[in-house]
Amino acid sequence: MIVVTGATGNVGRPLTQALAKAGEQVTAVSRRTATVPAGVRHVAADLGEPDSLAPALEGAKALFLLLSGDLHKPGARPAGLINLAAARGVRRVVLLSSQGVSTRPLGPTRVAMRALEDALRASGLDWAVLRPGGFASNALGWAESVRTQGAVAAPFGDVGVPVVDPVDIAEVAVACLLQDRHSGGVYELTGTQVITPREQAQTIAAALGTPVRFDEITRAEAKATMTRFVPAELADDTLDIISAPTPAELRISPDVVRVLGRAPHSFGDWVDRSIAAFR
C-alpha cells in the first residue's frame, strides 16, 4: 500500500492515477471527501493533526508527503507525520520539498522545510526528497480572469523562471516510491525553459486562439492576493524568487531526465493539456 497525501491536488492527482495504473494499492488522502480512481481507497485527514493520518497508514509501505501552505504556519508539527509513519511501519517516505531550501536557505518557510528534510533523514526510513521550482499549474490562478476578461494580472512580467509541469513531479515521485535506486536521492525539478509571466500569457493566448492582455501589478498587490491562500511568510519567500531569481533558480535541472529518461514537459505542453480551464 502506498499513501498519497494531497491526493486531489495538481501533483497528488496524477500521482495517484499513475500508481493505480501501475497496479499498486493506493490510499488517497485529502481533507475532504473526494472522487478517486477506481480501486483507490480514500481517507479524509487533516495533516495539521498528525494523528488523523493514522488510519490511512495501516498496512502502508510508502508515503508521499505533500504539505499544504498552512503547515508552514507557526505551531505546525509536520515532523510528527514522519514520526507517525515510522511508528506505523512505513518503510519509505518521498517528501515534496522546495527548490528554495537550497537556493534561499534563510527564507522563513525554507528554514522550516529544511528542518523537515533533516527530520526525514534522521528517521531511519528510506527516503527521497523532491525540490521543484515554480509550478506551471500556478497559471490556473489566472483562469477566471482569462475566461471573463481575456486578461492575466501578475507582478514582474518580464522576469522568468523554468516552471515545472506537475505531471513531471508526479512521475518522478512514482519512480522514487517504487525504485530502491532512488533511496537517499535529492532531486531538483524544473521545466525545459525560462519563461516569463508575459510569455506564459502569450502561450495561453496562442492555445486559445484569442488575445490575452497582460496587466502588470505590484508586489504588494500580488502579496495581497496570495495571502488569501497561503501564509504571508510563504508569499514573501515566493515573491522574492520570482522578482529576482538567482543563477541557481534560472538553471535548467537535469534531474527529470536522470530519473525518467526523457525531457521535462514544456509550459506549452501543460497549457495544451489544461486549456479547458481557460475557455
Image: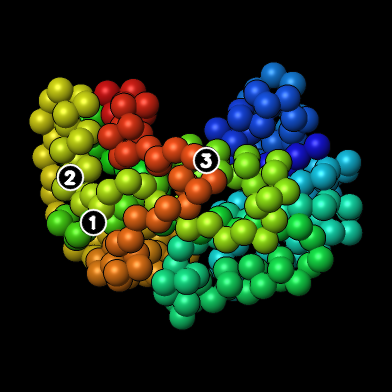
Left or right: where 265 falls relative to 199: right
Q: Position of residue 94 (x, y in %)?
A: 66, 53
Q: Position of residue 30 (x, y in %)?
A: 65, 41
Q: Residue at x 78, y 30 (%)?
A: 25
Q: How many C-alpha atoms fall within 10 Å of the one at disc 3: few (<14), some, or many (≥20)? A: some
Q: Which of marks 2 and 1 precedes in the sequence?
A: 1
Q: Visible in this render: residue 230?
A: yes
118, 78: nearer the viewer: 118
Q: Are marks 1 and 2 in contact (CB under 8 Å)?
A: yes
Q: Secondary structure at mark 2?
A: helix
Q: Name the kind of residue labelled 1 in the image.
A: Gly
Whole-angstrom CA distance, mark 1 to mark 2, is: 9 Å
Q: How many C-alpha atoms fall within 10 Å of the one at disc 1: few (<14), some, or many (≥20)? A: many
Left or right: where 193 falls relative to 234: left
Asked if residue 251 is positioned above or below residue 192 in the image, the reply reads below
Q: Position of residue 180 (x, y in %)?
A: 73, 48
Q: Which residue is mark 1?
A: 160
Quadrant assignment, res 220:
bottom left
78, 89: nearer the viewer: 89
State the mark number for residue 39. none
Asked if residue 138 is positioned above or below residue 183 in the image, the reply reads above
Q: Which of marks 3 and 2 precedes in the sequence?
A: 2
Q: Nearer the viewer, mark 2 or mark 3?
A: 3
Q: Residue at x 59, y 36 (%)?
A: 15
Q: Secondary structure at mark 1?
A: loop
Quadrant assignment, res 61:
top right
State the mark number for residue 199. 2
Whole-angstrom CA distance, mark 2 to mark 3, is: 27 Å
Q: Name the kind of residue labelled 2 in the image.
A: Glu
Q: Visible in this render: residue 43?
A: no
Q: Which residue is mark 3?
A: 260
Whole-angstrom CA distance, mark 3 to mark 1, is: 25 Å
